[in-house]
Image (cartoon, rainbow, N blue to C red):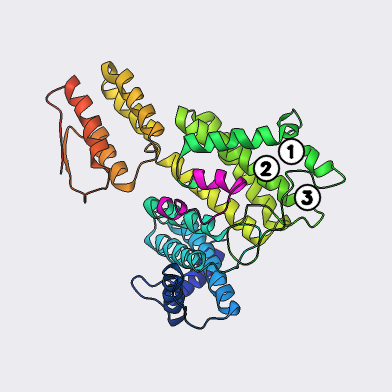
Amino acid sequence: MARLDEQRRELAMNFRFNRATPNELTPSQARLFVRSLQTSWQVPPIAWAARESHEQFDDARRLLHAAGIFRETDGSGSLTSLDCYRRAAELLEWLARASDAVTRDVPVALLAAGAYQLAGLPAMATGLLRQGRYGGGVAEIFAAFLSADFDLLLRESVEFWKDNPALTGREGSAALLAADEDPGIEKDEPARDDDHVDVEPARDGSKIGWYVVVELVRAVGLIGDSLRRGNEGRLTQAITKLSTLSELTTRLASDELWILVNLLEATARRFAANSLHSRVAALAMRAPSQQPRMWRFAREQFARGRGVLWTSQVQGLERLIANDSFALCTPTGSGKTLVANLARLIRERAPERLASVV
């Protein structure tokens, strides 16, 4: 097994070197970037064939696979993994901006946002999704999740279950697999001339695609609610559900739906690892008298869409948990205020504790 991992990592490293070298673009990648800008600016784009769009999408898919290998062998925070996720996200974003029809079942902007989240660039994911390049319907639910907007996620999920009351019973989605015909919301055939489509797998008689989508809605809704409440038990169950769906889609669903499931699962694990609740729990142990205020602060942050911490915030709070005095120096807009507010709460409990945030 160790030898197999070495071989997989070597292949992934070679592909990263050829397609995801930091601060460098291949000629094809550069042309796609230019074309995406020209399309956004509504000026005549350079000559480009549909084949080239699909080649770039295939490269993005391989980069996501390489990133997964690096996560397994080197850890989730490995720089090689982040490089692959970032380049994959860029390629997918440029394809989305150019309105290239490279997917049928899943809007390419959703895939780009998931890759940006795993590259450690949540602001890029949110900024892309705010442009609304992913259509509507069920895609709204996954877009809210990938934006870490859990209040919106739950509102959209409630609307989905209102439209599909038959799927809320004790049997859940099992009826979808047993039905003679594919149930669900009736939708027009997904458009092929742009990526403004809903997440709606092509109905090929297997029913598996729609079953997976419904169970994804169920899982991400539970994850969002569990993150807001700090319920780790239910959060673990929901992430396990995503892992099971990933195994199912490996063989029985479309390739792009499999990519979406894997991105959602990895993003959910990232959200769980970077949740503010776990840091507040550790801080509350050191300042029991401030515990109610800390939990209220955490709930307010989740309500404002700030409950999933950025890397600099994780580092600052880990320092605050472990040390009585430290300095946190990060760029403007990196989330220092959240760390400072929690440091202030602890300082009110024990004035001798001091955390400097610059």
**Label annotation for residue 207:** 3
Of 355 and 111, the residue lying toward us = 111
How crowded is the residue under tag 3: few (<14 C-alpha within 10 Å), some, or many (20+)? Answer: many
- In the picture provided, is 106 more to the left or to the right than 42? right
Q: Where in the figure is residue 251, as x and y percent of width and height?
A: 71, 57
Give the mark nearer the N terminus: 1 vs 2: 1
The C terminus sits in image quarter = top left
Q: Mark 1 to mark 2: distance in Å? A: 7 Å
Label 2 neighbour load within 10 Å: few <14, some 14-19, many 20+:
many
Left or right of residue 303: residue 201: right
Residue at horizontal 55 percent and vertical 55 percent from the top = 134
Please tell me in which quadrant of the rendered image residue 236 appears. top right
**Chain-order first, disc 3 or disc 2:** 3
Whole-number angstrom distance, CA of label 1 to CA of label 3: 11 Å
Tag on residue 214?
Answer: 2
Instruction: Please state the horizontal and vertical placement of residue 316, each as a whole percent of the image.
Output: 25, 41
Q: CA distance from mark 3 to mark 2?
A: 11 Å
* Region rendered in magenta: 126-145
Q: Which residue is mark 1?
A: 173
